[in-house]
Image: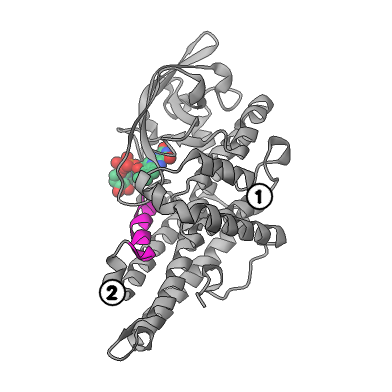
Amino acid sequence: MATHPATVLGLPKPDWAGDDVAMLYDMAEKFLDAEIAPRYEEFEKAECFDRASWKKAGEAGLLCASMPEEYGGSGGTYAHESAIIEAIGHVGVDGFGISLHNSIVAPYILHYGSEEQKKKWLPKMASGELIGAIAMTEPGAGSDLQGVKTRAEKDGNHYRINGSKTFITNGQLANLIIVVAKTNPSAGAKGTSLIVVETDEVEGFERGRNLDKIGLKSNDTSELFFNDVRVPTSNLLGHEEGQGFIQLMQQLPQERLQIGAGAIAMIERALSLTIDYVKERKAFGKAVIEFQNTQFKLAELKTEATIGRVFYNDCVARHVNGGLDPVTASMAKYWLSDLQNKIVDECLQLFGGYGYMNEYPIARMFRDARVQRIYGGTNEIMKLLIARSL
Ligand SMILES: Cc1cc2nc3c(=O)[nH]c(=O)nc-3n(C[C@H](O)[C@H](O)[C@H](O)COP(=O)(O)OP(=O)(O)OC[C@H]3O[C@@H](n4cnc5c(N)ncnc54)[C@H](O)[C@@H]3O)c2cc1C
């Protein structure tokens, strides 16, 4: 019988993974196995999901699980989001961009939106009618977000937005985009604001290329152009302009933690697939697992994965209780994504030539893993943030 990624490390369930979290994990896994996995190749080739899959995910309760019920969510916490992200990684449909929608975009609206904004947008995000994206990065501003040039100028009771963004996840499908823009270019970080653009409602918004990536093919990543896009001033997130940087800083721990969630889930899947493979594959008249090198290598990887999982679980426990500091979240992002790349690479090696063939999932994991060290703040930027605490 195949080794299940959720049990490959043989660890007890953490306290935050109570019955309801476990039930959501099972439900998510069943849904992804039945509805997404059979069509995943099609989405990888199309380099995009379809809207129908988002709507189905909404019906299955996989969108906005941590948003309050009064706004169409399921009233859960980050632990519930973690269950969904882990199911995505364990089933191996990593390109399904719902975790960004759920645990990055929706929380900005919940935490900084007015009652009216929450009522307007969150229920539609929970149903999949609105697909979320966050547009920070620009061709000339990635790590150094203070260099953002996109401008939002007040024009009566509207903003006029001009600028271009790049590398935006869900960029081809998203119809609710949180845009990081300068409302006062002379005020530095204090002149930055977050403004929601509902793309179906405006003129002057254009999607650029769906960018050709080395991995995460089924996840659309795009350029976006804003040419005199007019949105009501009531689309500003927060009570006043200039709060954008503070809002971004406050939400980054969860963004970084969810990258860690994807990392640990893929690590567990890589290990389970590899353990199964080396038990089957024969060389020199015996199973590959019988070589001491294979045993030692897998013993090392399982040990490191266990350290990673224990650290991740501790971060979630702290986060659910409101106590995950940005420095520890940065450690989780950088260390778990580095570990993911290392473990996937070592696992691929144990598949020999088959590991390099796209028909073997480990090959796709190798390509998909790489970006984890880059987005959400590069691992170098994570180290800068950690170093500031020394
Ligand atoms: C697949 C994918 C999806 C993405 N999704 C989104 C999204 O949804 N929304 C969004 O806004 N962005 C998104 N991004 C953008 C991502 O967050 C940026 O690519 C990332 O922050 C790095 O910015 P950059 O590419 O401009 O690199 P640069 O900032 O140009 O960095 C180049 C190199 O210099 C290093 N470097 C930069 N500054 C320092 C420093 N001070 N000290 C040491 N080293 C430094 C970096 O670590 C890196 O190695 C995505 C990117 C990818 C690839």
- Look at mark 2 in the image and give the residue it sits on: 352
Relative horizontal placement of residue 359, taking residue 316 as reference (left or right): left
262 or 87: which is nearer to us? 87
For the question of whether residue 330 can be seen, the reply is no
Extreme residue in the bottom direction? 285
Q: Answer few, some or many: residues within 10 Å of disc 2's Cα (few below 14, many 20 plus, some between 14 and 19).
A: few
- Corner quadrant of residue 67: top right
* Vertical position of residue 305 compared to residue 50: above or below: below
In the image, the segment drawn in magenta is 359-374
* Vertical position of residue 374 compared to residue 296: above or below: above
Membership of 390 in magenta stretch: no
Q: Residue at x 43, y 71 (%)?
A: 273
Relative horizontal placement of residue 89, taking residue 291 as reference (left or right): right
* Vertical position of residue 195 compared to residue 104: above or below: above
Q: Amino acid at mark 1?
A: Thr
Q: Answer few, some or many: residues within 10 Å of disc 1's Cα (few below 14, many 20 plus, some between 14 and 19).
A: some
Beta carbon at label 2 within 8 Å of ligand 1: no
Q: Residue at x 39, y 32 (%)?
A: 146
In which quadrant of the rendered image does the C terminus lie?
Answer: bottom left
**Percent position (x, y) of residue 265?**
49, 62
Q: Which secondary structure type mostly characterizes the magenta part of the structure?
A: helix
- Look at mark 1 in the image and give the residue it sits on: 77
Q: Amino acid at mark 2?
A: Gly
How far apart marks 1 and 2 lie (CA) works out to: 41 Å
Question: Nearer the observer, disc 1 or disc 2?
Answer: 2
Q: Secondary structure at mark 2?
A: helix
**Percent position (x, y) of residue 162?**
39, 20
- Corner quadrant of residue 173: top left
First-in-chain label (1 vs 2): 1
Question: Is the C-beta separation of discs 1 and 2 under 8 Å?
Answer: no
